[in-house]
Structure formats: structure tokens, C-alpha cells
Image: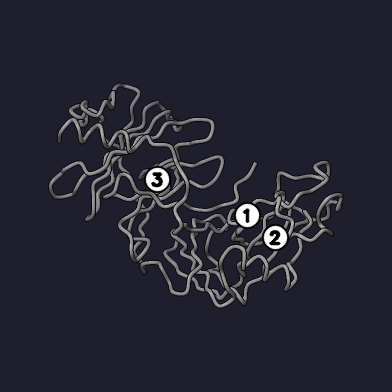
């Protein structure tokens, strides 16, 4: 592979995350705490316009300002506020919420008109934060837990999209498992400036679609840098190189390693019918959700909208 291509791959892998594309996904989040109902929630708040436009305000005055602090001021939107919300975020009651539980490889479909639309103060708020502004509230859709698989984890990786038709490929996502490799096998990759040394731990996963080598720099479960080398299974040709560094806002996720008790979850496969094979679960973001990356397209990523505010 030419030095020019190596440099291009490296630059693409270190580009900062920009704006989400229009074909974003949502992440379903489980909320539960004392004096608060246990709910599965899709936040629509990131799609709302700036709150300085009072004519577009969703939260009623009863829950703003010095409204008190009762169960995080959880409440269901009335029909007028519900209609205003859906109009502002560009959806209609006849649209459907499609969900894909990656861990269990299970799909769900809900019509928006059958879902409760609710709002509540984010869990970083307290009574001392009054007067409340609309920004303090999560506003979105509740997913009825009784219609979800009872064996699913409350904190599983479940992604969603609101659309007229199901955008997800069926039964394609697979949970990845890694084996520890001898890092000396990758000393010849010095053209990528990987700096293989005694502090590196190397892992490999191979399937019919690609071969992935993960090189973690730094001993233990908290590496400071992660290089991901993706190559074609048959030819061995390098097709993608991504590099991530640990920072205040970026964490390198624990890998699902065979025989290791402490592990995370990584996924690959065709998630969307009109997109290529994705990789997910290798980094976590403190602010927002980590995007999906594509195996064969170094410059492309798919944003996930979540309401991970601090």
C-alpha cells in the first residue's frame, strides 16, 4: 500500500466528529431511579429548535420557572403539546418507530400514535436548579416495556429510526469476539506509525466479511490509544485504519475477549438496508453517543442522537 494512502487513512481516522447527517439513528435509553417510573425512552430533544423561540415551546409554563421538584417533574404531554412536538421534529402520528436490539438481534415496530409522549427533568437537575428552562427537560417517546423481549437487558444496545418503512436489515448484526494476538505479528506495519512496543496488547477478530486487528497502547483495561486495522479476509489488503485516543470526552471501550470476565460488546454486520457493514462499540463518548463506522468507507460514519447531557 502506498504511503499516500496510508497518510489518507490516518487523517480520516483522526478527524474530529462533526455534525450528524440527516439519516441519524436514535438510541433507546432506560431510565430508573427512586420515585421515578421505570421507562424505556427515545429522546426527541436534540431535534428541537433553540428554546429562545417561545412560540415553539413544548413544555408548559406549569413545569417551568419555579415549578417545584416532584418526581423530576415527569408528565405526559397533552394533545396540543404532543402535536406541536411532532410537527417541530418533522414526524407524524402515522410514522413508525423501528427498533433493533443489537444484542439479541430482535426487531420491534411501534406506530407513533400508540406511544406515550412525555417529558421529565434530566437526572443532573435538582430542586436547586430552579428556575427551570425547557432545555432542562428530556422530551420524547416512551416505549412500552411489556412489548419488549422480557429476557433483554435494560441497558442493551437498542437503536431506532422513525420512518414509514423498516430501514433495518434483518438478522444481520453479530456480536464480535476477540482473541489476544502476539503484537510482534504487526511490527511490519510501521509505515502506519503504530509504534508497536511492550505496552501494546493486540487482538484479532475475523469473519467472512473482514479481518480486524485492534492494537491497544497501554497495559491493562484502560488503553490510552487504539488502532484498528481492517483488511479483506481473502487478500489481506488493508482497507481501513482508524485511530482513537483516550481523552476527557472519549473512552476506549472494553473488548469482548474470549475467556475474559470483564468485557464489553462490539457489533458488526449490515445494519441498514441501504448502507454497508458497520462497526460499533469500540469507543464511548461522555457527551453524546459514539457513532457507527463503516468497514469499507473510512470517511463515513452514522450519527446516533441521544440526550446524554451533563
Quadrant assignment, res 29: bottom right
Closest to the camera, between mark 1 and mark 3, is: 1
Q: Position of residue 242 (x, y in %)?
A: 33, 38
Q: Position of residue 228 (x, y in %)?
A: 31, 38
Q: Which residue is mark 1?
A: 49
Q: Which residue is mark 3?
A: 256
Q: CA distance from mark 1 to mark 3?
A: 39 Å
The residue under the point 49% across, 56% down is 157
The residue under the point 30% across, 42% down is 179
* Quadrant (top left, top right, bottom left, bottom right) of the N terminus: top left
Q: How many residues crowd around disc 1 within 10 Å: few (fewer than 14), some, or many (20 or more)?
A: few
The residue under the point 35% across, 45% down is 258
Q: How many residues crowd around disc 2 within 10 Å: few (fewer than 14), some, or many (20 or more)?
A: some
Check whether the beta carbons of the residues at disc 1 and disc 2 lie within 8 A of each other: yes
Q: Secondary structure at mark 1?
A: loop
> Toward the viewer: 8 or 184?
8
Q: Which residue is mark 2?
A: 56
Q: Is residue 148 above or below residue 43?
A: below
* Quadrant (top left, top right, bottom left, bottom right) of the C terminus: top right
Q: Secondary structure at mark 3?
A: loop
Amino acid at each position: 500500500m502506498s504511503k499516500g494512502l496510508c497518510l489518507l487513512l490516518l487523517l480520516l481516522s483522526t478527524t474530529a466528529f462533526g455534525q450528524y447527517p440527516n439519516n441519524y439513528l436514535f438510541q433507546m435509553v432506560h431510565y430508573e431511579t427512586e420515585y421515578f417510573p421505570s421507562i424505556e425512552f427515545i429522546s426527541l430533544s436534540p431535534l428541537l429548535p433553540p428554546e429562545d423561540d417561545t412560540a415553539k415551546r413544548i413544555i408548559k409554563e406549569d413545569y417551568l420557572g419555579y415549578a417545584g421538584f416532584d418526581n423530576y417533574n415527569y408528565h405526559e404531554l397533552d394533545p396540543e403539546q404532543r402535536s406541536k412536538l411532532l410537527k417541530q421534529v418533522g414526524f407524524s402520528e402515522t410514522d413508525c418507530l423501528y427498533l433493533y436490539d443489537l444484542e439479541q438481534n430482535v426487531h420491534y415496530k411501534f406506530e407513533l400514535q400508540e406511544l406515550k409522549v412525555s417529558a421529565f427533568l434530566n437526572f443532573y437537575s435538582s430542586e436547586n436548579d430552579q428556575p427551570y428552562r425547557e432545555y432542562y427537560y428530556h422530551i420524547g417517546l416512551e416505549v412500552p416495556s411489556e412489548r419488549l423481549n422480557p429476557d433483554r437487558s435494560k441497558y442493551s444496545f437498542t437503536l431506532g429510526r422513525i420512518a414509514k418503512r423498516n430501514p433495518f436489515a434483518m438478522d444481520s448484526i453479530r456480536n464480535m469476539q476477540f482473541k489476544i494476538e502476539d503484537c510482534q505479528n504487526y511490527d511490519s506495519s510501521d509505515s502506519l506509525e503504530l509504534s508497536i512496543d511492550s505496552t501494546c496488547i493486540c487482538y484479532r477478530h475475523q469473519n467472512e466479511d473482514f479481518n480486524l486487528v485492534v492494537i491497544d497502547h497501554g497495559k491493562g483495561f484502560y488503553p490510552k490509544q487504539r488502532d484498528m486495522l481492517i483488511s479483506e479476509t481473502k487478500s489481506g489488503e488493508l482497507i481501513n485504519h482508524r485511530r482513537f485516543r483516550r481523552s476527557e470526552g472519549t473512552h476506549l471501550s472494553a473488548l469482548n475477549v474470549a475467556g475474559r470476565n470483564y468485557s464489553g460488546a462490539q457489533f458488526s454486520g449490515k445494519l441498514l438496508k441501504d448502507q454497508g457493514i458497520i462497526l460499533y462499540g469500540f469507543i464511548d463518548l461522555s457527551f453524546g453517543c459514539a457513532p457507527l463506522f463503516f468497514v469499507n468507507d473510512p470517511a463515513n460514519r452514522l450519527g446516533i442522537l441521544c440526550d446524554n447531557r451533563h
